[in-house]
Amino acid sequence: MTTLHLPDFLVLCLCADWCGTCRSYRGTFDAVAAAHPEAGFHWVDVEDDAEWFGDIEVETFPTVLILRADTVLFLGPMLPQAQHLERTVETLAALSAEEVQRYAAASAERRGWQEVADVRTALAGRARSRG
């Protein structure tokens, strides 16, 4: 059985294989991932993996989902440029545990993000099914 180690800080890019912007963004996403080996970066095709991410609505590509433990810190479209992802990752990774909780509860939109499916369990299940 394949075991997937999931660090505390996760960054998922929700894209589609047919999307030219997503295909172009893949290298950027991978480069930012290489600069942050302490985090878990995962590329998720919204069509191939649709069953596991539940009610997440992806309206624009690329869409990025960032979690710290089980708290969703970001869920939305991301300009397909490295500096935007890099700045977002660095800012959110630097938050203390108290700041994470305040940030996640600061608006109705952010509180709504907390209803996202259990991403950690879904990623582990995805790894087992592909392992």
Image (cartoon, rainbow, N blue to C red):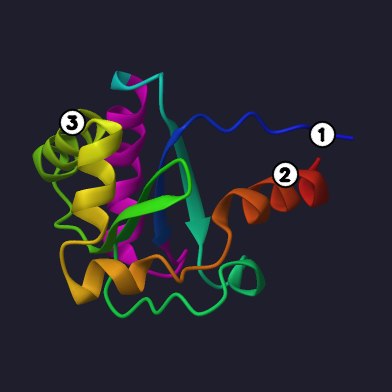
Q: Nearer the viewer, residue 18 or 109?
A: 109
Mark 1 lies on a secondary structure that is loop
Which residue has dot 1 on it? 2
> What stretch of residues is rendered in magenta?
15-34
Q: CA distance from mark 2 to mark 3?
A: 26 Å
Crowd around label 1: few <14 · some 14–19 · many ≥20 (10 Å): few
Is 75 one of the magenta-colored residues? no
Residue 90, disc: 3
> Which image quadrant is residue 31 in?
top left
Residue type at mark 1 is Thr
Tell us which disc is closer to us: 2 or 3: 3
Q: Which residue is mark 2?
A: 127
Distance from the alpha carbon under mark 3 to that under mark 1: 30 Å
Between 80 and 66, which is closer to the camera in this rendering?
Answer: 66
Q: Amino acid at mark 3?
A: Glu
Where on the picture, by quarter, is residue 76? bottom left
Q: Are marks 2 and 1 in contact (CB under 8 Å)?
A: yes
Q: Amino acid at mark 2?
A: Ala
